Image: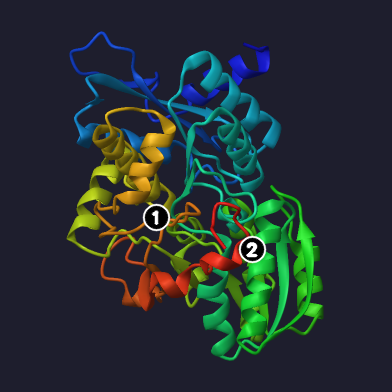
Amino acid sequence: MTTLTRRLLIGGIATAPLARPAIIRAQSTSKPVKLGLLSDMSGPYRDVGGPGNRLAVELAVQDFGGSVLDRPIEVMQADDQNKPDVSSSLAREWIDAQGVDVLMDGAASSAGLAVQQVCREKKRIYLITGPATSEMTGKQCSPYGIHFNYDTYALAHGTGDAVTKAGGKSWYFITADYAFGYALEKDTMAAVKAAGGQVLGAVRAPLGTADFSSYLVQAQASGAKVIGLANAGTDLQNCVKQASEFGLTQSGVKLATLLMQISDVASLGQKVCTGLNYTDSFYWDMSDKTRAWSKRWSDKMGGMVPGLLHAGNYCAANHWLKCVKAAGTTDADAVVAKMKATPINDFYNTDVKIREDGRVMHVMYLWQVKPPSESKSKYDYCNLVATIKPEDAWRPLNEGGCPLVKA
Protein backbone atom coordinates (compact mmCIF):
# COMPACT_ATOMS: atom_id res chain seq x y z
CA MET A 1 0.00 0.00 0.00
CA THR A 2 1.39 3.42 -0.90
CA THR A 3 1.80 6.18 1.69
CA LEU A 4 -0.87 8.22 -0.13
CA THR A 5 -3.38 5.36 -0.15
CA ARG A 6 -2.77 4.53 3.51
CA ARG A 7 -3.24 8.17 4.54
CA LEU A 8 -6.47 8.51 2.56
CA LEU A 9 -7.92 5.31 3.91
CA ILE A 10 -7.20 6.25 7.49
CA GLY A 11 -8.38 9.81 6.99
CA GLY A 12 -11.60 8.74 5.34
CA ILE A 13 -12.42 6.27 8.07
CA ALA A 14 -11.66 8.76 10.84
CA THR A 15 -14.07 11.36 9.50
CA ALA A 16 -16.96 8.95 8.93
CA PRO A 17 -20.01 8.81 11.28
CA LEU A 18 -18.33 6.16 13.41
CA ALA A 19 -14.73 6.49 14.60
CA ARG A 20 -13.78 3.04 13.28
CA PRO A 21 -14.78 0.87 10.30
CA ALA A 22 -18.45 0.01 10.56
CA ILE A 23 -18.58 -3.77 10.86
CA ILE A 24 -22.01 -5.06 11.68
CA ARG A 25 -21.33 -8.71 12.46
CA ALA A 26 -23.51 -11.73 12.83
CA GLN A 27 -22.05 -14.69 14.76
CA SER A 28 -19.66 -15.79 12.03
CA THR A 29 -15.95 -16.23 11.37
CA SER A 30 -16.44 -15.97 7.61
CA LYS A 31 -14.71 -13.36 5.47
CA PRO A 32 -16.79 -10.16 5.51
CA VAL A 33 -18.73 -8.92 2.52
CA LYS A 34 -17.30 -5.43 1.95
CA LEU A 35 -19.03 -2.32 0.61
CA GLY A 36 -16.63 0.52 -0.11
CA LEU A 37 -17.65 4.18 -0.49
CA LEU A 38 -15.27 6.59 -2.22
CA SER A 39 -16.65 9.94 -1.12
CA ASP A 40 -15.99 13.63 -0.78
CA MET A 41 -15.16 13.90 2.92
CA SER A 42 -13.56 17.34 2.94
CA GLY A 43 -14.64 19.28 -0.15
CA PRO A 44 -17.69 20.95 -1.72
CA TYR A 45 -19.84 17.79 -1.74
CA ARG A 46 -19.25 16.68 1.83
CA ASP A 47 -22.59 17.92 3.16
CA VAL A 48 -24.70 16.49 0.34
CA GLY A 49 -22.87 13.16 0.54
CA GLY A 50 -19.87 12.46 2.73
CA PRO A 51 -20.48 10.93 6.18
CA GLY A 52 -24.23 10.98 5.57
CA ASN A 53 -23.80 8.52 2.70
CA ARG A 54 -21.99 6.09 4.93
CA LEU A 55 -24.67 6.33 7.60
CA ALA A 56 -27.32 5.59 4.95
CA VAL A 57 -25.46 2.43 3.92
CA GLU A 58 -25.06 1.40 7.56
CA LEU A 59 -28.85 1.72 7.97
CA ALA A 60 -29.34 -0.53 4.94
CA VAL A 61 -26.96 -3.09 6.45
CA GLN A 62 -28.77 -2.87 9.78
CA ASP A 63 -32.15 -3.40 8.10
CA PHE A 64 -30.73 -6.38 6.24
CA GLY A 65 -29.74 -8.04 9.50
CA GLY A 66 -25.98 -7.40 9.42
CA SER A 67 -25.00 -10.39 7.31
CA VAL A 68 -25.53 -11.94 3.89
CA LEU A 69 -24.66 -15.46 2.67
CA ASP A 70 -23.77 -16.21 6.32
CA ARG A 71 -21.02 -13.59 6.16
CA PRO A 72 -20.80 -10.35 8.18
CA ILE A 73 -21.09 -7.08 6.26
CA GLU A 74 -18.43 -4.37 6.51
CA VAL A 75 -18.85 -0.76 5.36
CA MET A 76 -15.70 1.19 4.40
CA GLN A 77 -15.29 4.82 3.37
CA ALA A 78 -12.41 6.99 2.20
CA ASP A 79 -11.92 10.51 0.86
CA ASP A 80 -11.33 10.49 -2.91
CA GLN A 81 -10.81 14.28 -2.89
CA ASN A 82 -12.90 14.50 -6.11
CA LYS A 83 -9.73 13.55 -8.01
CA PRO A 84 -9.69 10.83 -10.70
CA ASP A 85 -6.15 9.66 -9.87
CA VAL A 86 -6.92 9.35 -6.16
CA SER A 87 -10.26 7.59 -6.71
CA SER A 88 -8.83 5.09 -9.20
CA SER A 89 -5.85 4.35 -6.94
CA LEU A 90 -8.12 3.72 -3.99
CA ALA A 91 -10.48 1.57 -6.07
CA ARG A 92 -7.62 -0.66 -7.25
CA GLU A 93 -6.18 -0.93 -3.75
CA TRP A 94 -9.52 -1.85 -2.23
CA ILE A 95 -10.31 -4.47 -4.87
CA ASP A 96 -6.85 -6.04 -5.16
CA ALA A 97 -5.60 -5.90 -1.58
CA GLN A 98 -8.71 -5.69 0.56
CA GLY A 99 -11.22 -7.71 -1.43
CA VAL A 100 -13.94 -5.07 -1.53
CA ASP A 101 -16.98 -6.66 -3.17
CA VAL A 102 -18.80 -3.56 -4.42
CA LEU A 103 -17.87 0.11 -4.80
CA MET A 104 -20.25 3.01 -4.18
CA ASP A 105 -20.58 6.80 -4.30
CA GLY A 106 -17.75 8.43 -6.31
CA ALA A 107 -18.61 12.09 -5.55
CA ALA A 108 -17.44 14.23 -8.50
CA SER A 109 -18.22 12.91 -11.98
CA SER A 110 -14.59 12.95 -13.07
CA ALA A 111 -13.66 10.78 -10.08
CA GLY A 112 -16.65 8.53 -10.68
CA LEU A 113 -15.75 7.95 -14.32
CA ALA A 114 -12.30 6.82 -13.15
CA VAL A 115 -13.87 4.38 -10.67
CA GLN A 116 -16.16 3.09 -13.42
CA GLN A 117 -13.14 2.28 -15.57
CA VAL A 118 -11.42 0.37 -12.77
CA CYS A 119 -14.59 -1.58 -12.00
CA ARG A 120 -14.99 -2.45 -15.67
CA GLU A 121 -11.44 -3.85 -15.74
CA LYS A 122 -11.72 -5.67 -12.41
CA LYS A 123 -15.28 -6.94 -12.93
CA ARG A 124 -16.70 -5.31 -9.81
CA ILE A 125 -20.12 -3.72 -9.56
CA TYR A 126 -20.10 0.05 -9.13
CA LEU A 127 -23.21 1.52 -7.51
CA ILE A 128 -23.04 5.07 -8.89
CA THR A 129 -24.66 7.39 -6.37
CA GLY A 130 -22.55 10.56 -6.33
CA PRO A 131 -21.56 11.37 -9.94
CA ALA A 132 -24.21 13.06 -12.06
CA THR A 133 -22.84 12.92 -15.60
CA SER A 134 -25.15 11.11 -18.00
CA GLU A 135 -22.03 9.62 -19.63
CA MET A 136 -22.16 6.97 -16.89
CA THR A 137 -24.90 5.27 -18.90
CA GLY A 138 -23.86 6.79 -22.24
CA LYS A 139 -20.70 6.20 -24.22
CA GLN A 140 -18.75 5.36 -21.05
CA CYS A 141 -21.31 2.88 -19.69
CA SER A 142 -20.16 -0.36 -18.12
CA PRO A 143 -21.77 -3.80 -17.70
CA TYR A 144 -21.02 -3.38 -13.99
CA GLY A 145 -22.22 0.22 -13.51
CA ILE A 146 -25.67 0.93 -12.04
CA HIS A 147 -26.56 4.65 -11.92
CA PHE A 148 -28.89 5.64 -9.09
CA ASN A 149 -30.44 8.97 -7.98
CA TYR A 150 -30.08 11.44 -10.86
CA ASP A 151 -28.07 12.35 -13.91
CA THR A 152 -27.44 15.52 -15.90
CA TYR A 153 -30.03 14.63 -18.53
CA ALA A 154 -32.88 14.32 -16.01
CA LEU A 155 -31.78 17.41 -14.07
CA ALA A 156 -31.48 19.47 -17.24
CA HIS A 157 -34.79 18.42 -18.73
CA GLY A 158 -36.71 18.68 -15.47
CA THR A 159 -35.60 22.19 -14.51
CA GLY A 160 -34.46 23.54 -17.89
CA ASP A 161 -37.67 22.63 -19.67
CA ALA A 162 -39.92 24.01 -16.90
CA VAL A 163 -38.07 27.32 -16.53
CA THR A 164 -37.91 27.92 -20.30
CA LYS A 165 -41.59 27.17 -20.82
CA ALA A 166 -42.43 29.51 -17.92
CA GLY A 167 -40.91 32.43 -19.84
CA GLY A 168 -37.16 32.07 -19.29
CA LYS A 169 -36.33 32.13 -22.99
CA SER A 170 -32.73 33.35 -22.85
CA TRP A 171 -29.98 31.66 -20.81
CA TYR A 172 -26.39 32.19 -19.72
CA PHE A 173 -24.50 29.48 -17.82
CA ILE A 174 -22.05 29.50 -14.94
CA THR A 175 -20.55 26.04 -15.18
CA ALA A 176 -18.30 23.93 -12.93
CA ASP A 177 -15.09 23.39 -14.88
CA TYR A 178 -14.98 19.57 -14.98
CA ALA A 179 -16.92 16.59 -16.37
CA PHE A 180 -20.10 17.08 -14.31
CA GLY A 181 -20.43 20.76 -15.22
CA TYR A 182 -19.79 20.15 -18.92
CA ALA A 183 -22.41 17.40 -19.06
CA LEU A 184 -25.01 19.41 -17.15
CA GLU A 185 -24.42 22.47 -19.31
CA LYS A 186 -24.64 20.43 -22.52
CA ASP A 187 -27.81 18.61 -21.50
CA THR A 188 -29.50 21.80 -20.26
CA MET A 189 -28.62 23.72 -23.41
CA ALA A 190 -30.30 20.99 -25.43
CA ALA A 191 -33.39 21.11 -23.20
CA VAL A 192 -33.60 24.92 -23.40
CA LYS A 193 -33.36 24.94 -27.19
CA ALA A 194 -35.91 22.13 -27.50
CA ALA A 195 -38.32 24.20 -25.37
CA GLY A 196 -37.92 27.24 -27.64
CA GLY A 197 -35.24 29.12 -25.72
CA GLN A 198 -31.80 30.39 -26.71
CA VAL A 199 -28.36 30.25 -25.10
CA LEU A 200 -26.41 33.52 -25.00
CA GLY A 201 -23.18 32.14 -23.58
CA ALA A 202 -21.38 30.39 -20.73
CA VAL A 203 -18.41 30.81 -18.41
CA ARG A 204 -16.46 28.09 -16.58
CA ALA A 205 -15.57 28.32 -12.87
CA PRO A 206 -13.06 25.97 -11.18
CA LEU A 207 -14.30 23.45 -8.61
CA GLY A 208 -14.10 25.00 -5.15
CA THR A 209 -14.50 28.62 -6.30
CA ALA A 210 -15.24 30.97 -3.39
CA ASP A 211 -15.73 34.25 -5.28
CA PHE A 212 -18.21 34.17 -8.15
CA SER A 213 -18.45 37.94 -8.59
CA SER A 214 -16.68 38.10 -11.97
CA TYR A 215 -18.75 35.22 -13.33
CA LEU A 216 -22.00 36.78 -12.15
CA VAL A 217 -21.05 40.11 -13.73
CA GLN A 218 -20.45 38.35 -17.06
CA ALA A 219 -23.78 36.55 -16.79
CA GLN A 220 -25.65 39.76 -15.98
CA ALA A 221 -23.94 41.63 -18.84
CA SER A 222 -25.22 39.02 -21.32
CA GLY A 223 -28.78 40.29 -20.81
CA ALA A 224 -30.07 36.74 -20.30
CA LYS A 225 -33.33 36.29 -18.43
CA VAL A 226 -32.03 33.10 -16.78
CA ILE A 227 -28.64 32.31 -15.27
CA GLY A 228 -28.23 28.55 -15.32
CA LEU A 229 -26.05 27.29 -12.45
CA ALA A 230 -24.38 24.09 -13.66
CA ASN A 231 -22.63 23.46 -10.37
CA ALA A 232 -23.40 21.92 -6.99
CA GLY A 233 -22.54 21.76 -3.29
CA THR A 234 -20.74 24.75 -1.80
CA ASP A 235 -20.04 26.08 -5.31
CA LEU A 236 -23.78 26.36 -5.90
CA GLN A 237 -24.33 27.85 -2.45
CA ASN A 238 -21.69 30.53 -2.97
CA CYS A 239 -23.12 31.38 -6.38
CA VAL A 240 -26.71 31.72 -5.14
CA LYS A 241 -25.70 33.72 -2.06
CA GLN A 242 -23.56 36.14 -4.05
CA ALA A 243 -26.22 36.56 -6.73
CA SER A 244 -28.64 37.57 -3.97
CA GLU A 245 -26.12 39.98 -2.45
CA PHE A 246 -25.58 41.61 -5.86
CA GLY A 247 -29.32 42.04 -6.28
CA LEU A 248 -29.50 39.97 -9.47
CA THR A 249 -32.74 38.21 -8.60
CA GLN A 250 -34.32 41.47 -7.45
CA SER A 251 -33.51 42.96 -10.87
CA GLY A 252 -35.65 40.34 -12.59
CA VAL A 253 -32.97 37.78 -13.51
CA LYS A 254 -34.01 34.23 -12.64
CA LEU A 255 -31.58 31.68 -11.26
CA ALA A 256 -31.97 28.11 -12.50
CA THR A 257 -30.38 25.78 -9.95
CA LEU A 258 -29.74 22.65 -11.97
CA LEU A 259 -28.50 20.51 -9.10
CA MET A 260 -29.75 21.76 -5.77
CA GLN A 261 -30.49 19.64 -2.72
CA ILE A 262 -32.20 20.23 0.58
CA SER A 263 -28.90 20.72 2.39
CA ASP A 264 -28.25 23.69 0.09
CA VAL A 265 -31.55 25.27 1.14
CA ALA A 266 -30.72 24.67 4.79
CA SER A 267 -27.28 26.22 4.39
CA LEU A 268 -28.38 29.27 2.41
CA GLY A 269 -31.63 29.88 4.24
CA GLN A 270 -35.14 29.40 2.95
CA LYS A 271 -35.66 33.11 2.36
CA VAL A 272 -32.69 33.34 -0.01
CA CYS A 273 -33.86 30.25 -1.91
CA THR A 274 -37.57 31.13 -2.12
CA GLY A 275 -38.88 30.58 -5.63
CA LEU A 276 -35.98 28.43 -6.83
CA ASN A 277 -36.91 25.25 -8.72
CA TYR A 278 -34.94 22.03 -8.68
CA THR A 279 -35.38 18.47 -9.90
CA ASP A 280 -34.95 15.51 -7.57
CA SER A 281 -36.19 11.96 -7.03
CA PHE A 282 -36.44 12.17 -3.23
CA TYR A 283 -37.80 14.54 -0.60
CA TRP A 284 -37.85 13.68 3.08
CA ASP A 285 -41.50 14.73 3.54
CA MET A 286 -43.03 12.77 0.65
CA SER A 287 -44.76 10.02 2.65
CA ASP A 288 -44.95 8.28 6.01
CA LYS A 289 -42.16 5.94 4.88
CA THR A 290 -39.80 8.73 3.83
CA ARG A 291 -40.49 10.63 7.04
CA ALA A 292 -39.81 7.54 9.18
CA TRP A 293 -36.52 6.75 7.42
CA SER A 294 -35.46 10.38 7.46
CA LYS A 295 -36.00 10.55 11.22
CA ARG A 296 -33.76 7.51 11.74
CA TRP A 297 -31.05 9.14 9.65
CA SER A 298 -31.57 12.57 11.24
CA ASP A 299 -31.35 11.24 14.79
CA LYS A 300 -27.79 10.08 14.06
CA MET A 301 -26.78 13.19 12.11
CA GLY A 302 -27.49 15.90 14.63
CA GLY A 303 -30.99 16.79 13.47
CA MET A 304 -30.26 17.43 9.78
CA VAL A 305 -32.56 15.96 7.17
CA PRO A 306 -31.27 13.61 4.45
CA GLY A 307 -31.04 14.53 0.81
CA LEU A 308 -31.18 12.62 -2.42
CA LEU A 309 -27.67 11.18 -2.23
CA HIS A 310 -28.23 9.84 1.26
CA ALA A 311 -31.50 8.17 0.30
CA GLY A 312 -29.92 6.90 -2.93
CA ASN A 313 -27.06 5.22 -1.09
CA TYR A 314 -29.52 3.34 1.10
CA CYS A 315 -31.46 2.35 -2.01
CA ALA A 316 -28.34 1.12 -3.82
CA ALA A 317 -26.91 -0.86 -0.91
CA ASN A 318 -30.29 -2.38 -0.06
CA HIS A 319 -30.92 -3.52 -3.63
CA TRP A 320 -27.41 -4.92 -4.03
CA LEU A 321 -27.67 -6.91 -0.78
CA LYS A 322 -31.07 -8.31 -1.76
CA CYS A 323 -29.68 -9.45 -5.09
CA VAL A 324 -26.53 -10.96 -3.56
CA LYS A 325 -28.79 -13.04 -1.34
CA ALA A 326 -31.04 -14.02 -4.25
CA ALA A 327 -28.08 -14.91 -6.49
CA GLY A 328 -26.35 -16.84 -3.71
CA THR A 329 -23.02 -15.20 -4.54
CA THR A 330 -21.16 -11.90 -4.70
CA ASP A 331 -19.97 -12.66 -8.25
CA ALA A 332 -20.45 -9.45 -10.21
CA ASP A 333 -21.91 -10.98 -13.37
CA ALA A 334 -24.50 -13.01 -11.46
CA VAL A 335 -25.46 -10.16 -9.13
CA VAL A 336 -25.72 -7.44 -11.80
CA ALA A 337 -27.98 -9.73 -13.86
CA LYS A 338 -30.17 -10.25 -10.80
CA MET A 339 -30.20 -6.48 -10.09
CA LYS A 340 -31.42 -5.67 -13.59
CA ALA A 341 -34.04 -8.41 -13.45
CA THR A 342 -35.40 -7.40 -10.03
CA PRO A 343 -37.52 -4.25 -9.48
CA ILE A 344 -36.27 -1.88 -6.78
CA ASN A 345 -38.50 -1.49 -3.75
CA ASP A 346 -37.67 0.53 -0.65
CA PHE A 347 -39.02 3.48 1.34
CA TYR A 348 -39.18 5.79 -1.70
CA ASN A 349 -39.12 3.52 -4.76
CA THR A 350 -41.87 1.16 -5.89
CA ASP A 351 -41.17 -1.42 -8.61
CA VAL A 352 -38.47 0.74 -10.20
CA LYS A 353 -36.62 -0.94 -13.07
CA ILE A 354 -32.97 -0.83 -14.11
CA ARG A 355 -32.39 -0.49 -17.85
CA GLU A 356 -29.81 -2.47 -19.79
CA ASP A 357 -27.51 0.58 -19.87
CA GLY A 358 -27.50 0.65 -16.05
CA ARG A 359 -29.92 3.59 -15.64
CA VAL A 360 -32.21 3.28 -12.60
CA MET A 361 -35.59 4.57 -13.79
CA HIS A 362 -36.72 6.59 -10.76
CA VAL A 363 -39.77 8.81 -10.85
CA MET A 364 -38.48 12.41 -10.80
CA TYR A 365 -40.09 15.47 -9.23
CA LEU A 366 -39.88 19.20 -9.83
CA TRP A 367 -39.81 21.10 -6.52
CA GLN A 368 -40.05 24.80 -5.69
CA VAL A 369 -38.77 26.35 -2.49
CA LYS A 370 -41.72 27.97 -0.70
CA PRO A 371 -41.65 31.24 1.30
CA PRO A 372 -40.85 30.75 5.00
CA SER A 373 -44.35 32.01 5.86
CA GLU A 374 -45.84 28.89 4.23
CA SER A 375 -43.71 26.38 6.17
CA LYS A 376 -45.50 24.35 8.82
CA SER A 377 -42.38 22.90 10.44
CA LYS A 378 -38.59 22.94 10.38
CA TYR A 379 -37.23 21.76 7.00
CA ASP A 380 -40.67 22.13 5.41
CA TYR A 381 -39.04 23.87 2.49
CA CYS A 382 -40.66 22.74 -0.75
CA ASN A 383 -43.86 22.46 -2.74
CA LEU A 384 -44.26 19.80 -5.39
CA VAL A 385 -44.64 21.42 -8.81
CA ALA A 386 -44.69 18.40 -11.11
CA THR A 387 -44.24 14.63 -11.14
CA ILE A 388 -42.12 13.47 -14.07
CA LYS A 389 -42.68 9.93 -15.32
CA PRO A 390 -39.55 7.82 -15.89
CA GLU A 391 -40.07 7.68 -19.65
CA ASP A 392 -40.10 11.49 -19.70
CA ALA A 393 -37.34 12.07 -17.14
CA TRP A 394 -34.54 9.96 -18.54
CA ARG A 395 -32.68 10.03 -21.84
CA PRO A 396 -34.14 7.60 -24.39
CA LEU A 397 -32.22 4.33 -24.42
CA ASN A 398 -31.23 4.63 -28.06
CA GLU A 399 -29.77 8.15 -27.71
CA GLY A 400 -27.02 7.58 -25.14
CA GLY A 401 -24.51 5.70 -27.25
CA CYS A 402 -24.02 2.96 -24.66
CA PRO A 403 -22.35 -0.02 -26.40
CA LEU A 404 -24.34 -2.41 -24.20
CA VAL A 405 -27.57 -1.37 -25.91
CA LYS A 406 -28.51 -3.48 -28.88
CA ALA A 407 -29.27 -1.53 -32.04
Looking at the image, residue 388 sits to the left or right of residue 130; the answer is left
Q: Nearer the viewer, mark 1 or mark 2?
A: 1
Q: Residue furthest top?
A: 29
Answer with left or right where residue 247 lies relative to residue 353.
right
Q: Quadrant of the N terminus?
A: top right
Counting every numbered tag in the picture gives 2
- Rendered location of residue 182, percent (x, y): 71, 59
Q: Which mark is residue 184?
A: 2
Q: Horizontal and vertical percent for residue 357?
A: 50, 54
Name the residue: 60% across, 86% down: 195
Q: Is residue 268 visible?
A: yes
The x, y position of residue 387, in whole percent, is: 36, 76
- Sequence-wise, the earlier of marks 1 and 2 is 2
The answer to whether residue 247 is seen in the rendering is: no
Q: Residue 245 versus residue 406: which sits nearer the camera? A: 406
At label 2, counting other C-alpha atoms closer than 10 Å, the crowd grade (few under 14, some 14-19, many 20 or more) is: many
In percent of width and height, residue 122 lies at 56, 28
Q: Residue furthest front?
A: 407
Q: CA distance from mark 1 to mark 2?
A: 22 Å
Q: Which mark is residue 202?
A: none
Identity of the residue drawn at 68% across and 58% down:
181
Q: Quadrant of residue 372?
A: bottom left
Q: Quadrant of the C terminus?
A: bottom right
Amino acid on which the number 1 mark rests in the picture = Ile
Q: Which residue is mark 1?
A: 354
Q: Quadrant of residue 398?
A: bottom right
Residue 141 left/right relative to 323: right
Task: Answer above or below: position of 349 versus 56.
Answer: below
Q: Amino acid at mark 2?
A: Leu
